[in-house]
Image (spheres, helix red, strand yellow):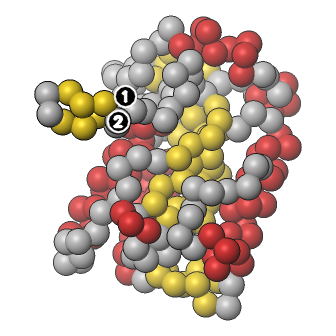
Amino acid sequence: MNNHNNRHITKSIRLKTWDYRTPWWYFVTIATKNHKDYFGQIVNGEMKLNRLGVMVNQKWLKIAELRKNVELDYYVIMPNHFHRVIVLNYIIDNSGKLLLQADKFLEEQIELNNTKLFYSKISPKPNSLSSIIRSFKSSVTKSANELNLTEFAWQPRFYDRIIRNEKKLFNIRNYIEQNPLKWKLEKNYPENMPEL
C-alpha cells in the first residue's frame, strides 16, 4: 500500500494493460468482509440461500435487465462469496451509444496480446466491469441494511480473471458448478482457486 496524505491507498489488482469495458468473458469472485457467512449455508453439498442470499440472486439477475451490454453466464452464491462468469457484449458510452461490437472470441480464441494495446488506449469509463460490480455490491449492501443486517460488508476489492479461451471457460464453469461440494476445502479462502 502507498500512503498519500496520511491515507492508505491500495494498489489495484486489475491488469494494467487491459480496458475492463472490453467485450469479453470474465470470471469474477467477490467475498464478504472477513469471509463472514451472510448468504446461507451448505447442506449436503447444496447451497441453501437465506433471505439476503435470495436478494443477492435477484440483484444479480437484474443486472442483465438494467445493462443491455451485459450477459450473465454460470454463477454460484456461496455462504461468504459469489463466483460468476459475466460477459460484456459491447462497449457503450455514457449516452448508451455503441462504440465497439464484441467478436466471437470463443470460436476465434483471440490471444490477449493481439488486442491489449488497442484496448489499453481506451480509458476506463462507466459500463466497465468494475462499475458493474461496484453497482451490484452497493445494491446488495442497501438490501442488507433494509433487512437490518447493518454489519454486512463486502471485501473492498474483487477477484477477476480474463477468460482466454473455450477450455478455460469450460474449466471455470465446472469449478462454479462443483463449488458447493468443495465448500469445506476452501471455506475461508475463496480466492485460492486452482489454476483453471
Q: Which mark is residue 9?
A: none
Q: Kindly identify the amino acid type of the residue bearing the numbered disc 2.
A: Met
Left or right: 69 with respect to 74? Answer: left
Q: Residue at x 76, y 28 (%)?
A: 104
Residue at image position (67%, 56%) is: 193
Q: Which residue is mark 2?
A: 1
Q: Amino acid at mark 1?
A: Pro
The residue lying at 48 percent from left, 55 percent from top is: 30
Q: Within 10 angstroms of label 2, few (less than 14), some, or many (20 or more) residues? A: few
Q: Nearer the viewer, mark 1 or mark 2?
A: 2
Residue 38, located in which quarter of the rendered image? bottom left
Front residue of this view, candidates 145 and 179: 179
Residue at image x 65%, y 36%?
162
* Quadrant (top left/top right/bottom left/bottom right) for the N terminus: top left
Compared to 63, does 22 lie above or below? Answer: above
Extreme left residue here?
Answer: 5
Q: Is residue 57 visible?
A: no
What x and y, as percent, mark residue 61? 49, 58
Which quadrant of the figure has residue 97? top left
SS category of the residue bearing label 2: loop
Residue 126's label in the rendered image is 1
Q: Residues within 10 Å of mark 1 (few under 14, many from 20)?
A: few
Tell me if 7 is positioned left or right of 135 in this view.
left
Disc 1 to disc 2, how far (Cα)? 26 Å
Residue 180, position in %: x, y? 66, 75
First along the sequence among labels 1 and 2: 2
